[in-house]
Image (cartoon, grey):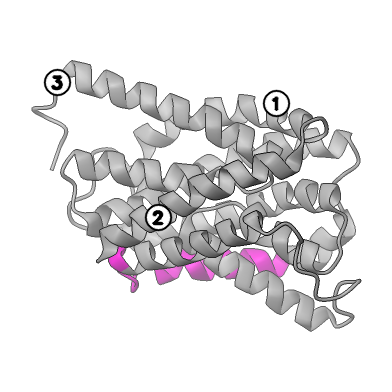
Amino acid sequence: MTLDGYSTTLLIQLVIGLLATGVVAGILAGLLGVGGGIVIVPVLFWIMTSLHFDAEVAMPIAVATSLATIIPTSISSTRAHRKRGSVDFELLKLWGPAVAVGALIGGLLSHVIDGEGLLFIFGFIALAVSINMAIPKTLVISDHLPKSSWVNRTIAAVIGVFSSLMGIGGGTLSVPTLSAFSFPIHRAVGTAAAIGLLIAIPGVLGFIWSGLGAEGRPPLSLGYVSVPAAVVIFPVTFLCAPIGAKLAHSLNQRYLKLAFAVFLAITAIRMLSSAF
């Protein structure tokens, strides 16, 4: 299947839509630490299905392409947070390897989990994240991270697997997890930006391998990564992530999280309805 037959006007509208998605995703990555993928995945999925690509292909393409766009976003956001001293490098040493291994496993699992399965995973976890963001009081499990290094690595690996399968950066799952262990919120957000890079690179490699030879992919795809879509979103997310990081230190986080929780809940429900 190709894009032949689609009007120039439609393609221009799609490019504009991708650029706007990149702006929102980049700002959110720095602002809330949720990772731009939580916006990019559903938008790419709806764009591809509107172009009549099968949902079984559209979903892994959306997830893999989102992971690819997270690479520059994470680099830009991490640099901005590092300047403010909010990246915890000790935690990165502890969690990093396990997160990367988990992300690679998630990417490879896309070879056996179909598009409908990815829709369910994204929808259910996104709905849980939206509920967590809407709750006034953050769930607290402990006043410190687990003492055991293996418990920490297990947590990190699980975050890596599901973040990769959802096409999201580290913030969406790692920030609420760290907050549950009373980790300072600004350091959680800053460190999550770096975790996003450790998720995106191995996750993308796994999705590239899984998608090699898959039928029905859009033109110029590398495995399940849509190169044209990634190229359009790449520079915008990279430029906008520092804006979000700057705003994170000046805006009322509570109201922002409530607004995003509503948006995310609606998105999750729509994604789940697509799976049924």
Residue corresponding to mark 2: 208
The residues tagged by marks 1 and 3 sit, at their Cα atoms, a distance apart of 34 Å
Can the viewer see residue 231? yes
In the rendered view, would you say 208 is above or below 147? Answer: above
Residue corresponding to mark 1: 243
Q: Are marks 1 and 3 in contact (CB under 8 Å)?
A: no
Foreground mark, 3 or 2? Answer: 3
The residues tagged by marks 3 and 2 sit, at their Cα atoms, a distance apart of 29 Å
In the rendered structure, which segment of residues is drawn in magenta? 97-116
The residues tagged by marks 1 and 2 sit, at their Cα atoms, a distance apart of 31 Å
Using a 10 Å C-alpha cutoff, classify the residue at mark 2 as few (fewer than 14 neighbours), some (14 to 19) or many (20 or more): many
Q: Which label's residue is closer to the chain start, 1 or 3?
A: 3
Q: Nearer the viewer, residue 117 or 198?
A: 117
- Residue at 74%, 75% in the rendered image: 153
* Percent coordinates x, y for residue 272 in the rendering: 34, 62
- Residue at 60%, 51% in the rendered image: 169
Amino acid under label 2? Ile
Foreground mark, 1 or 2? Answer: 1
Residue corresponding to mark 3: 7
Q: Is residue 163 left or right of residue 173?
A: left
